[in-house]
Amino acid sequence: MEQPALLSIIRTETTYRFRLDLPGGPLGQEYSTDLTAEVRERLRRSLQAIGQTTEVKRSGTRVGPTQDALLTLGRYLFETILPAPLQESIRRVETALIMSTNTPDIPWELMYDNSPKSKRYLCQALSVGRIVHQERETMQQRFAPLERPGRKINGRRDAQGLSVLFLVNPTNERPGAEEEVATLCTSLPESVTRIILYRQQANQLQMRVRIGADTPHVLHYAGPLPQTNGTGEPTLALAGNSRLDTNVFEQLLQGLPKHPLVFLSYHEDERGGRSI
C-alpha cells in the first residue's frame, strides 16, 4: 500500500508551523507564518462567514455558506497562511495526504489553489485525512526526557553505543505498553540512544525516516498481539490501518549494514506477554 504524505500544521502563540514529509524521503523543512493581528482578524472573519447560515423564510430551511465564502477562506488559507514553498510542494503531491494539526477549528482541507492548472480545493485534488496533534504533543512532552540523541556523522547517528527504536501502542488501545516503555527507558544506561515512535507516529513513513537516519540496533515493538494475513503470515499492527509484515519489514531495512534485533512485547487486555 502506498504511503501517504504527512503535512504537520502546529499553532503556537505567535506562529503557524508547517512541515511536509513525503513518503520515501527525509524529514521536510519546517516553515512558519507569523500570527499577526491582521492575520488573526482576517482568519476570524473568514471562519465566521463559513459558520453563518442564511434562513430561507419561505421554506423554513437553512442553507450552508455561499461558494464565495468558501473560496475566500480557501484561498486565504492556501495563498496567505500556507508558506509559498509548501504551496508548490503540495501541488506535486501524488499520494494521499494526512494532516497532523492541533487546530481542529480550521478546515485546512478547504485550502484552494487558484493557479490556472488547479483551481480546486485540496480535498478535491487529493485524498485527505486528519489526525489530532494535541495528544501527540502531550506524549512528546512525556517521552522527550527519555530520548537520548546520538552524535550524527554524515547524516546518520554515530554507530558507537546501542540504539533502540521503540514502536509504542500504535493502535492507541494499549496504554500499558506506554507505561512499560516509559519505565524501561528510564532504567536504560545513558549510553543507549532511545528513538521513540508512539501512537500515530508508529507508521511506515516515520519508521522509514528514523531507520534511515538512526540505524537502530534493536527494534522494540510494544503493542497488540499479531494477526495473520490471507497467507497465514503474522503481521503487526501499525498506526492507522497499516501493517508490518515480512515484505514491508524488508523494504524498511534496505540499505542497513545489519538487520536489528526485533523484540516483541505483546499486550492484550492490559496483560503483557513478551516474546523475543
Image: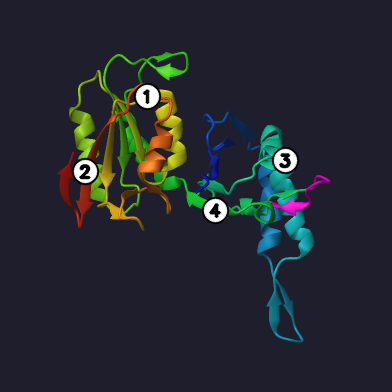
Residue in view at x 39 percent, y 24 percent:
256
Residue 62 counted in the magenta span: no
Q: Nearer the viewer, mark 4 or mark 2?
A: 2
Q: Nearer the viewer, mark 3 or mark 2?
A: 2
Q: CA distance from mark 4 to mark 3?
A: 22 Å
Q: CA distance from mark 3 to mark 2?
A: 47 Å
Q: Determine if residue 65 is in view.
A: yes
| Comes first in the chain, label 4 or label 2 | 4
Residue 116 counted in the magenta span: yes
The numbered mark at residue 129 is 4
Residue in view at x 20 percent, y 21 percent:
189
Q: Quadrant of residue 89?
A: top right
* Three-letter residue code for mark 4: Gly
| Comes first in the chain, label 4 or label 3 | 3
Residue range of the region highlighted in magenta in the rendering? 114-121
Q: Secondary structure at mark 1?
A: loop
| Comes first in the chain, label 3 or label 1 | 3
Q: Nearer the viewer, mark 4 or mark 3?
A: 4
- Badge 1: how crowded within 10 Å, few (<14), some, or many (20+)? many
Q: Residue at label 2? A: 265
| Comes first in the chain, label 1 or label 4 | 4
Residue furthest to the right in view is 116
Q: CA distance from mark 3 to mark 1?
A: 39 Å
From the image, which quarter does the C terminus lie in? Answer: top left
Q: Are marks 3 and 2 in contact (CB under 8 Å)?
A: no
* Three-letter residue code for mark 1: Thr
Q: Determine if residue 138 is in view.
A: no
Q: Residue at label 3? A: 80
- Badge 4: how crowded within 10 Å, few (<14), some, or many (20+)? some
Q: Secondary structure at mark 4?
A: strand
Q: Are marks 1 and 4 in contact (CB under 8 Å)?
A: no
